[in-house]
Amino acid sequence: MHMIRILPTRTLHNVLSRRAFLWRERVAFGYHPITPFHNATTTMSHSGRSASESPESPAALAKRQKIQSLGDVISRKQPAAFGTFSIPADQWTIFYGTKGNTNRINLSNASEAELQHLSDACQPATFGVNKEDVLDESYRKAGKMDVTDFATNFDVINSGILDVIRSELLEGHESNKAIKTELYKLNVYGKGAFFKPHKDTPRSTTMFGSLVIVFPTKHEGGALMLRHGGSEWMFDSAAKVRTQVDPSIAYIAFYSDVEHEVTPVTSGYRVTLTYNLYFATEPINNIIPVIPAPSSTEIAFTTALSTLLSDKAFMEKGGILGFGLQHEYPLDPKAGLGNLINCLKGSDAIIQRVCSQLSLQTDLHVIYEDRDIEGKSPPFVMAKDIVDYSQDEGTGMTFGERLIDCDGGQRVAVTGPIADEAAQHACTVYHSDDDIDDESENDDDEFKDDYVVDVDWVTDLTKFTGTTSYVAFGNSPQMDCVYGNVCLLVHIGPPEDRTRHSN
């Protein structure tokens, strides 16, 4: 059982600010997240030249433009599916209360007095901060009821909503994946209730999203705002259900790494059921497998990548393409990346699927930033796992050196289209084939070519591949997993080895 800790508003915000600072200072798992280029300091490349001073050959320019064209076709689809659904008359009832004092309410035509009674039966809704339940009504004001205190005859499995989620949220071949639902909470938002921006707490590496069912109780306000990748969407469920002739529920399913908030309810009661959504490992018994039509993004990406592979002038000696993935994923520090390759979402899943279809080898990596190298070598280090050095300090090694020596890490060069942005912000662009002064007195391994891996980044390394934790403002104190960013590396062979890939 979690203890509920009630903090004064000022104290709470101080705690959250301090914890965010500690996270940035590598307390939680012993590493730094990647910072944007404009926060990077000016350093010099192996040859002593800054990125902006390095001339670019016609061949290098052509390669960069081709990679840029590949990145341009990767669209960012809306990370949610929503709408309304008519459900059978016998699925509107909620049973709630304690043993010997059970109540029921029909949410298709509930009176204000009945809704008031349901609201009064709820407990104040808390939210998670570093494995603690925190009650702060300046950040979240709502009522909540745990699954042990209510029951519903609403059948989410056979309602048809999961079919919509598979077809509208999970693109292309992902729409055949089995979905496991877990009823999480009943919430009641009365007048003045709200929930400020937060992300749903990750509970498993297979958790990919959340589903919110909004009943057609009379209310105004309480719209759900979604934010992801610099874009924002609003889902006004009250307005949606109000336009329906027959009583209907409103639903919205969204990826769990999407920040969202509930705007203040101005009148009435907003009653919701929330489900956690997981990729199931077992097949769906009642679904006949079909081969879905590829999405427009998948078709465009397949065409663009196949065109590059058939171009003998592109990566004549082979190489590695890097994709900073769009979504954050639940990462278990104890289990590592594990089966994450099978749980990618949206355009991330499309990239992986197309590469697999073209018989290209792919790997997931975590990219760390080593801030203590004093400009001697590339600051980015990649690894195939999550590491924790927080309890083992005082080795005399930088974080990156420790990662390389003990856990197989490799320094990564910043190349590809995003190198332009690096140069604009005075951040070094490193290449493993940069000239090295043979007369240098420093013969450390950090200057050897095989120490640095050249990766041509198709999508932005810095925005999508820094490993971070959303320990603050979660909807639950559970922290078995943390949200993190990963990158996908695609190995490209020389032209003579990839003819079959483009056919």
Image: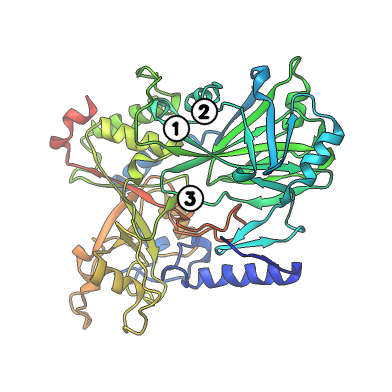
Q: Is residue 371 visible?
A: yes
Instruction: Give, as a three-letter code, the residue at label 3.
Output: Arg
Look at the image and tell me in which quarter the C terminus lies.
top left
Q: In this view, does 114 lie above or below 256?
A: above
Location of residue 314 in the rendering, given as x and y in whole percent from the top left corner: 25, 39
Task: Indicate which disc, 1 or 3, sits on the residue closer to the N terminus.
Answer: 1
Location of residue 252 in the rendering, given as x and y in whole percent from the top left corner: 61, 32
Return the residue at label 3: 203
Secondary element at tag 2: helix
Instruction: Give, as a three-letter code, the residue at label 2.
Output: Ile
Return the residue at label 1: 179
**Residue 476 placement: quadrant:** bottom right
Residue at the (68%, 32%) spot, across then down: 94
Residue at the (69%, 68%) spot, across then down: 12
Residue closer to the observer: 429 or 291: 291
Tell which tag, 2 or 1, sits nearer the viewer.
Answer: 1
Label 2–label 1 contact, CB within 8 A: yes
Secondary element at tag 3: loop
Instruction: Give, as a three-letter code, the residue at label 1.
Output: Ile
Return the residue at label 2: 165
